[in-house]
Image (spheres, rainbow, N blue to C red):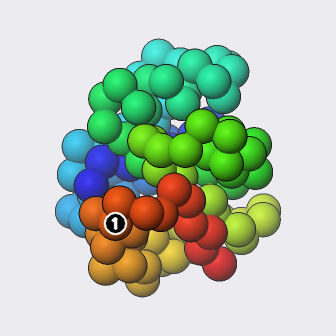
Amino acid sequence: MRLLFDQNLSYRLVTLLSDLYPESAHVRLAGMAGQQDSVIWEYARAHGFVIVSKDVDYLAISARLGHPPKVVRIGLGNCPTAEVVELLQFHHDELLHFAQNENGAFIELR
């Protein structure tokens, strides 16, 4: 499963989670810093990514357009990157199942 981390998350997540989520990317490292959500959505769809964000706007886009891409919303609020790492590590199996499930479009983790 390839994750695309939104700009509201640290670019360091790519390296910190590379063992569990290889080939993941960050919008900043992909040259899309400051881009609109719709541009990031299309990039994720075209390149087989699951979007990971704290932004609720992606849930609205997902409800309107369906998937792909699928969306993982991080519902932690303001927190250190280490907490996001722990959350994504803890939910790894659940996220793999989510990515393979034809029916699910988005999931929120807390």
Residue 53: x and y in percent read 61, 50
Left or right, 75 with reference to 39: right
* Residue count near mark 1 (Cα–Cα under 10 Å), binned few <14, some 14–19, many ≥20: few
Depth check: give the residue in front, 26 or 108: 108
Asked if residue 55 shows in the view, the reply is no
Depth check: give the residue in front, 62 or 2: 62
Residue sitting at 23 percent across and 43 percent down? 23
Local secondary structure at mark 1: loop
Left or right, 21 with reference to 81: left
Q: Quadrant of residue 26?
A: top left
Depth check: give the residue in front, 53 or 100: 100
Q: Name above or below for residue 42 compared with residue 85.
A: above
Residue 33: x and y in percent read 59, 21
Residue sitting at 58 percent across and 19 percent down? 39
Residue 86: x and y in percent read 48, 77
Left or right, 66 with reference to 36: left
Residue sitting at 68 percent across and 40 percent down? 64
Q: Amino acid at mark 1?
A: Asn
Asked if residue 1 shows in the view, the reply is yes
- Residue beneath disc 1: 101
